[in-house]
Image (spheres, helix red, strand yellow):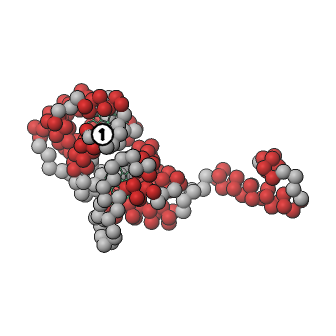
């Protein structure tokens, strides 16, 4: 560390060099002690805002709003950077709870305000919250048909009915059906990018297959 300071600081006078060393050592010890880059209160305030739309503890009660609790860290971080790049559709949405007079906004605008540290801290915090599958009305025949399509085309990457966060592929089983329906439409019209191998499978689905899959995922508890 002292060597590194010398290289960075160069030949300075005694006092100045000491102050510099102390500064570097301070920064160094913060890093090595692993103190969170974001204060707990700041993280709380951010999550409060997210939960105004996504629901208490990130569990949604609204069909068009995805549950974000239990999403894997990697998928969550990825999604927020994609929204920062405005590379995924982000329709305006009203706040669903808390102060509902807040102006409608969207995920691209929200992500634009987040720092890298914010994004990391949010992804870790939501990954630790329990995923609660939504209780939804579904058609049992369609769900059974969807299960067969899923087993054949999707299970390889979305195991446990798409409820295994370790797959790093989002959460499908128990996700809100309105959100899933919008997502399928975005993949189909190309407005949301998808992995190449998934696209091959998606493009081969009939409209009936898609509807059946939505009911299958919606039926999962
Ligand atoms: C004004 C409402 C609103 C607020 C506030 C909000 N979101 Fe969202 N979020 C949405 C909507 C609606 C979607 C669904 C897709 C879309 O429209 O982009 C979404 C989608 C997402 C997704 C994608 C989920 C997936 O499975 O791909 C993530 C991740 C996410 N939001 C995280 C957050 C985080 C973290 C915050 C707080 C910093 C937040 N959201 C605040 C409305 C909101
Ligand atoms: C080769 C692996 C692979 C296959 C096969 C695959 N997927 Fe995916 N899927 C992924 C990955 C990785 C993601 C996360 C990246 C992304 O959001 O684009 C994902 C994301 C999704 C999402 C978005 C989840 C969210 O949180 O918004 C849906 C919906 C989805 N897949 C449905 C399906 C369906 C239905 C099939 C079968 C027809 C399928 N996938 C086949 C890898 C795959």
Above or below: residue 37 compared with residue 219? below
Dot 1 corresponds to which residue? 190
Residue at (14, 49) in percent of width and height: 137
Residue 136 seen: yes
Residue at (87, 56) in percent of width and height: 12
Q: Secondary structure at mark 1?
A: loop
Residue at (28, 43) in percent of width and height: 186
Q: Quadrant of ligand 1?
A: bottom left
Quadrant position of residue 162: top left
Confirm or reject: label 1 Cβ below 8 Å from ligand 2: no
Quadrant position of residue 195: top left
Quadrant position of residue 99: bottom left
Q: Work out whether residue 130 or residue 117 is closer to the camera in this orientation and state it.
A: 117
Rendered location of residue 102, percent (x, y):
34, 70
Describe residue 119's horizontal placement relative to residue 70 as left or right.
Answer: right
Q: Residue furthest top?
A: 152
Q: How many labels were placed on the picture? A: 1
């Amino acid at each position: 560390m002292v060597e590194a300071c010398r290289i960075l600081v160069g030949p300075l006078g005694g006092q100045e060099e000491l102050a510099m060393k102390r500064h570097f050592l301070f920064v160094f010890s913060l890093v090595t002690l692993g103190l969170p880059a974001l204060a707990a209160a700041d993280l709380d305030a951010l999550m409060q805002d997210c939960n105004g739309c996504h629901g208490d503890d990130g569990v949604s009660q609204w069909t068009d709003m995805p549950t974000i609790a239990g999403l894997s860290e990697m998928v969550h971080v990825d999604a927020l950077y994609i929204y920062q790049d405005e590379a995924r559709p982000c329709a305006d949405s009203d706040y669903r709870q808390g102060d509902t007079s807040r102006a409608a906004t969207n995920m691209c605008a929200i992500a634009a305000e987040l720092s890298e540290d914010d994004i990391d801290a949010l992804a870790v915090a939501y990954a630790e919250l329990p995923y609660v599958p939504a209780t939804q009305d579904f058609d049992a025949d369609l769900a059974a048909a969807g299960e067969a399509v899923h087993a054949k085309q999707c299970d390889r990457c979305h195991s446990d009915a798409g409820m295994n966060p370790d797959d790093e592929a989002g959460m499908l089983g128990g996700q809100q059906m309105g959100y899933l329906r919008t997502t399928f439409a975005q993949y189909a019209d190309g407005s949301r990018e998808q992995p190449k191998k998934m696209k091959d499978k998606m493009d081969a689905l009939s409209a009936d297959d898609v509807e059946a899959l939505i009911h299958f995922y919606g039926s999962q508890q």
